[in-house]
Image (tube, helix red, strand yellow):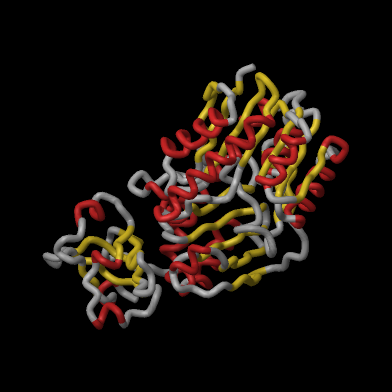
Amino acid sequence: MTASSYPIVRLRPKANARAIRHGFPWVYDNELVTDRRTKALSPGTIAVLEDDARHEIGLVTVNPNSKIICRMLDRDTGASIDEAWLEARLRAAFEMRERLFDAPFYRLIHAEADGLPGVVIDRFGDVAVIQPNAAWADVLIEPLAAALARVAGVSTIVMNGTGRARGLEGLSDETRVMQGAIDAPVPVPMNGATYMADIMGGQKTGLFYDQRPNHAFAARLSRGARVLDVFSHVGGFSLAALAGGAEQALAVDGSAAALDLAEQGAAAMGMSGRFATRKGDAFAVMTSLAEEGAQFDVVICDPPAFAPSKNALEAGLRAYERVARLAAPLVAPGGYLGLCSCSHAADLAKFRGASTRGIGRAGRTAQLLHTGFAGPDHPLMPQLAESGYLKALFYRLLP
């Protein structure tokens, strides 16, 4: 479509047009005039957004089925959102990652922060996984994949259309191989460890790159240490700890499939003799370990998002406090405790407060050594707090 042929959508008079002009990328459904014509737009339609005085603001994608009814694509209303436009956005992101990383294993597209709202693309060497978490990306998935193949030179492209974000957009679940073939987990080198990414059956895209710098910090604490990795997934912190010289590591997770991949990773590193797993509910396992009198030099807890929305915030903070309370007794005197949150609704201050309360309720005294965030392949969009979701707190528990 040419820019002149895009439909027009308009902000309500009380909408915060200034925030949108200054970079906020979303328009909520109560901020847009949703007349019969707007409601009839098919999800993923590209439109010109105007303020209530009919001044153009930019090109947006519209989804009448979503609470986030518009997402900003381009401030230039004369732009054409086509394959060439997609390729330009991908190339800008690709060039930055290639500057930052010496191997092709990273998050290539981090949604709004990389100018492709609702789109996540993770690269695993010659394999790339696209998560189209917004309707417009579902509509343009074929040209997006074609542009990706040209920019990154990958031979295998997988569309992973699953997860909570797609449900909020009114999109159905779908996972398929769009190009090439994949029939086994992909080995991923990171921080000296080897992780096995299950591209087709694992969580999200198969591996979490966002914790890379926090894995590295934990590895520095783990030389010669006994390490406990709770909510380990495929061995994120425990395998990094072994690569950093840990004496032994125990990974705890509720998923047998994830722990099997962790064991495969340890075997690929030649570390099977220093690595063990324990399947079960993390809270129950931590309670059992305390009853057994077990203690570790380093304990890391990296749970799922306990507060995925504002409505879940209070319950989520109680869960984070409980994690800290159960984990603290497992840390040997003078040892280290790492606590993580991937809940954007729980900001750093609230998460730190809950974690510190939990440590105190366990009767331990702590120093806060380090606060970590996601790596640079997960850039933060300054106007969008949700893009800076990851927090990691590292404490030393005093003797």
Q: How many marks?
A: 0
Query: Residue 189 occupies which quadrant of the picture?
Result: top right
At a point 53% along the width and 39% down the height, the residue shown is 321
At a point 32% along the width and 66% down the height, the residue shown is 70
Q: Is residue 261 left or right of residue 354?
A: right
Q: Is residue 120 left or right of residue 283?
A: left
- Name, please, the residue furthest toward the right: 273
At a point 40% along the width and 73% down the height, the residue shown is 44
Query: Residue 62 occupies which quadrant of the picture?
Result: bottom left
The C terminus is located in which quarter? Answer: top right
Q: Is residue 292 left or right of residue 18?
A: right
Residue 323 location, x and y as percent? 59, 40
Residue 39 location, x and y as percent? 30, 79
At a point 57% along the width and 29% down the height, the residue shown is 394
Is residue 83 visible in this depiction of the protein?
A: no
Image vertical order of residue 398 relative to residue 238, above or below:
above
- Name, please, the residue furthest toward the left: 53
Is residue 194 visible in this depiction of the protein?
A: yes
Observer-nearest residue: 315 or 260?
315
Image vertical order of residue 363 relative to residue 251, above or below:
above
The N terminus is located in which quarter? Answer: bottom left
Observer-nearest residue: 385 or 197?
385
Residue 119 location, x and y as percent? 48, 60
Residue 106 location, x and y as percent? 59, 48
Image vertical order of residue 317 relative to residue 40, above or below:
above
